[in-house]
Image (cartoon, coloured by chain):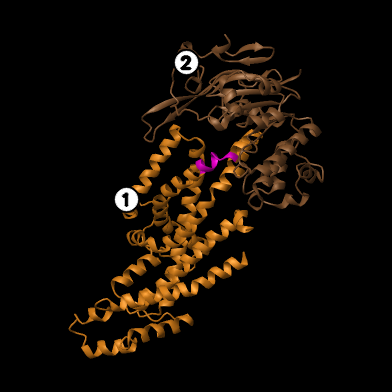
Chain colours: A brown, B orange
Amino acid sequence: MEEILRCEKISKVFVVKDFLGINKRKVKALQDVSITLNKRIDLGIVGESGSGKTTLAKVLLLLVRPDSGSVYYRNTDLTSLPDSKLRFFRNNVRIIFQNPYKSLNPRLSVEKTIKEALFPKKTDPGMIEEILIQTGLPADYKHKYPHQMSGGERQRVAIARAIAGSPECIIADEPTGNLDATTEVHILKLLDGLKKTLGLTFLFITHNLKIVVSFCETIVIMYRGCIVEQASATQILKYPLHPYTRVLWNQSSFINPVEEYKDREGCVFLFGCPYRKKICFNLQPELKEKEKQHMVSCFLYE
Amino acid sequence: MKRLIIKRLLQLIPMLIGMSFVSFIIIQSSPGDYFAQMKMNPEISPETIESMRTSFGLDRPILVQYFLWLKNMCKLDFGVSFAYHIPVKTLIKFRLKNTICLAIFSLFMSWIIAVPLAVIAGYKEGTFFDKLLSMCAYFSISLPSFFVALLFVYFISKTNLLPIGGTRSIFEVDASTIMVFKDYMKHLLVPGLVLCLVNVGGLFRLMKNNFIETFNTPFILAAWARGVSRNSVIFKHTLRNALNPMFTILGMEIGSLLNGAALTEIICGWPGMGSLVLEAVLSHDLYLVMGSLVISGFLLVLGNLIGDILIAFFDPRIRIS
């Protein structure tokens, strides 16, 4: 397996201030998160809002610097490099953001948006049109501005921008999160098609486990900044181990307990877990391999 | 764009008529007029005052007076000033040139200072430099223009660095145009810098907030994620989008500077429109007030039109809707 991107023991804490800036509290966005993205093996990250998925995507791109841990791109440690030396990496690993209404510069036409993302900058005539057609947009859309397009069309432009520099990997941060059900299907089909035709590797972030199971080979389940389970899509589909993963499969019947983000001891899923034991109140279980390539962080399996 | 300009200029007509009508009625309904002050002078007979009122058309009903004034105004005849005894048009022409020069100078200076500093402070938000600049901006906002003008005048008079009062010094007859221009600019510096100093704080705060707001939008994050250079992120992506609300402010500023600089003009002895309007209102110089109001209204709309054109020019969302 050819490794593209890897992060090791990533932790990130955000300090949140109140209105007057007097009271501060710490929010652990990521706690000792380690993942590896291998070539042509798509990785899905699933979790509810606030589980640290987007922070992880930003840390992987070094848009947010981690407090501890390292990010490696093809075995080169990126965390020690300044932003000015990350250009080559950022061209090879692109991101598609959740909100197509806000992720495009309103003042740039589609042509300029894609042109800016090309690498190297010099373009062959007709290249932009070709990219647009690849993403299912008519070639004459290059003259349009974001406000002249629908949400689905904007997201296609964002995808066109992501593939413009011929990257090897794309981080898709809930790319269908702001779209209706029909457009969501079209966008997922488009991403699947691009994956095959361009040989892309995806790191797919979503809150919908059902989508990611059909799209990715490996799945990571996150809860409150921690990885609670990591396995192949088939294993997650057939034998989900962690109580939270089971909850994700049956989301409609689960109401997540409202809990303050405070620095407390114990398992992150303590208050939502129907199987909690005494030890769960005191310690966060380690991520351990229960079965072959099936990792889980739960005392039920220790 | 053409449609926008024509639409705005057409909107100007009912606005000017409405504004002038209300102003005319209010001024004429208020007790006393310019000639009432003359009655205090025992050397002027009541018959003379009455004949002057008749010659200026003030003996007719208010509505008739207004429509006569409106009719003349359509021919660009604003009447004759009671106090100066010269046509209002001539008086305004001279003063307007000075006011426009002052407005352009102070606007240019305040923008050229506020925008770059706001960009730096916004980019380095929370640093010592940002806090220092923000503190200076608070000073600028909290200082009233007349106070700054007084300080400037005091300082200049003590140091004799620049001329104060009027628009030109006494020259020989054959003084070259460049010399006259240089002298005009020297006279302009004091009131111009006072207005700049008063405006720059507010502009800085607005621009900095716009910059920070735009800088934290997802499309800027997307630009960083693509490896776009820092300069491109700051100038091409952030600044261009952050300037939008500033153009609206610019339009409003043009209008307000033309009228709102009266105190500075008076203290610095700059013969502009602001001081002229104030004097005219105090002395009930009806036609001068009306003439100045029409010009100010026109310039206010013109300022907003310039702001709208700039927004439309720079923002495709307005240009291509």
- The residues colored magenta run B211-218
Image-based side of A252 in relation to B299, left or right = right
Q: Mark 2 is on which residue type?
A: Gly
Assess disc 1: are there few (<14), some (14-19) or many (≥20) residues with their C-alpha within 10 Å of its C-alpha: few
Circle 2 marks a residue in which chain? A
Q: Dot 1 corresponds to which residue?
A: B151
Most common secondary structure along the magenta stretch: helix
Q: Are the residues flagged by discs 2 and 1 from a single subunit? A: no
Q: Mark 1 is on which residue type?
A: Leu
The correct choice, above or below, for A1 with respect to A216 in the image is: above
Circle 1 marks a residue in which chain? B
The correct choice, above or below, for A123 with respect to A252 in the image is: below
Q: Dot 2 corresponds to which residue?
A: A266
Image-based side of B130 in relation to B266, left or right = right
Residue B213 among those drawn in magenta: yes
The correct choice, above or below, for A135 with respect to A220 in the image is: below
Q: Secondary structure at mark 1?
A: helix
Image quadrant in which you'd find residue B271: bottom left
Residue B310 among those drawn in magenta: no
Q: Give residue B216's position: percent from left, percent from top.
A: 54, 38
Q: Quadrant of the N terminus of chain A?
A: top right
Q: Give residue A206's position: percent from left, percent from top.
A: 62, 31
- From this viewpoint, is residue B291 visible? no
